[in-house]
Image (cartoon, rainbow, N blue to C red):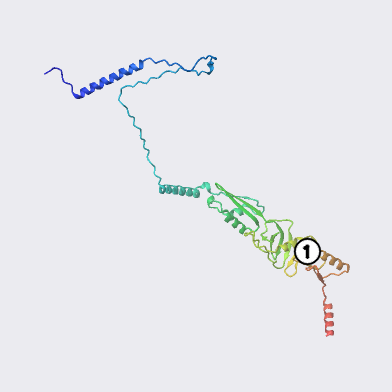
Amino acid sequence: MSDRRELSRAEIVRRRRAQRTAKELEQTAKRALKPIVPVNSRTPTSSSRGTIPNSSRPKLVAKPRRFNIALGLPEFHLHKLKISMPRIHANWRLASILLSILLGVAIYLAFTLPYFYVPGATVLGNVRLNRDEITNVLGVVGQSIFTIQPDELEARLRMNYPELLSAEIKIYLPNHVYVTVSERQPVILWQKGEGYTWIDQAGVAFRPRGAETGLVPVVAVDEPPAGLPDLADPFSPLPYMQRELVDAVIALFPLLPAGTTMTFDSAHGLGWKDPRGWQAYFGTSAHDMPLKIRVYQSLVDSLMARNVFPETINVVYADAPFYRIAVTETEELTTEETVDSGQ
């Protein structure tokens, strides 16, 4: 039996592989140390006709050479990293529930937080109505700003105060309420019995507030003809009298004798008791009132020139005025006898 051990197949394979690797390394080193063959440029530098200027030649910049050495190393394979992100699935039912909860909390806070409670209303444009009266009718003090309806408050204010010509309500966050009103201007002080009221240019009657100068006083025996409603303003009250009657009062007022008061009754219209003893009537029409006044003045001048003092002067119809003279008891008996004898 020989002392030399016989190699196994695996050892033979490893030895061959080591020899092949050493041989490849040796060949690679020889190729790396092999000198480079110089390369001559084929571009002519000169010719028989002349020399190419150096400026036209491309300048070569020396760059460091890079050598690639193939090493007999085992191959490495880099695997691409796979990063998996968790996929989020939209759950609309859960999102709607969360949104409903948030809205519910917001509504609850809006109606319960004292920050949104109205401490009072700011009133602008009022002259006779005071702020407290308007605020009490509105009822906004202590209310949440989100529960206030401006249209309803405007209607409530106009219905309670006919002396308001207009009302506008605006609200601002967090708790501000602004009320802008416009009041009616009275022109007539209308008195019937023991009561009296103010009347504006449109014939709307409303409660007097304080003292007002420049009003035309009228003492009425009965009710005047009512006016027509204002279709453009649904909250405007029904006029107490016709607008034409208001115009007639204003037109007749400058002729009113000193110390007298204008009167009204449904049968004869406007008039007054003259200090000289007669009752004058002018009707209710305003369009011919200047003509009636001229006719009245002419008739009075004629009667005074004849020293006639009538009982009544009626110019309700300007084209047919008349006057009536008071008849004594003696004249009435004489008249009756004349009538009887004639029969």
* Along the line of sight, the residue nearer the viewer: 104 or 26: 26
Query: Circle 1: is it few (<14), some (14-19), or many (20+) Cα within 10 Å?
Result: many
Q: Can residue 12 be seen in this view?
A: yes
Residue type, mark 1 in image: Met
Q: Can residue 144 be seen in this view?
A: no
Q: Residue furthest left?
A: 1
| Residue at image point 26% right, 19% down | 19
Query: Residue tagged by mark 1?
Result: 289
Q: In which quarter of the image is residue 190?
A: bottom right
Q: Quadrant of residue 230 in the image?
A: bottom right
Q: Which residue lies furthest to the front in this view?
A: 48
Left or right of 51 in this view: 19: left
**Figure check: 57 above or below 328:** above
Identify the residue shown where x is 34% and y is 17%: 31
Image mark count:
1
The residue at the point 30 percent across, 20 percent down is 24
Instruction: Point out residue 198 in the picture as x, y percentages from the top left corner.
Output: 69, 60
Measuring from the top left, give residue 13's x and y in whole percent: 22, 23
Tell whether 286 sits left or right of 59. right
SS at circle 1:
helix
Q: Is residue 270 left or right of residue 236?
A: right
Residue 14, percent across and down?
A: 23, 23
**Relative image position of residue 224 (x, y in whole percent):** 70, 66
Work out whether residue 7 or residue 223 is closer to the camera in this orientation and state it. Answer: 7
* Left or right: 126 in relation to 321: left
Which quarter of the picture shows residue 84? top left
Camera-nearest residue between 164 and 93: 93
Image quadrant holding the C terminus, namely bottom right
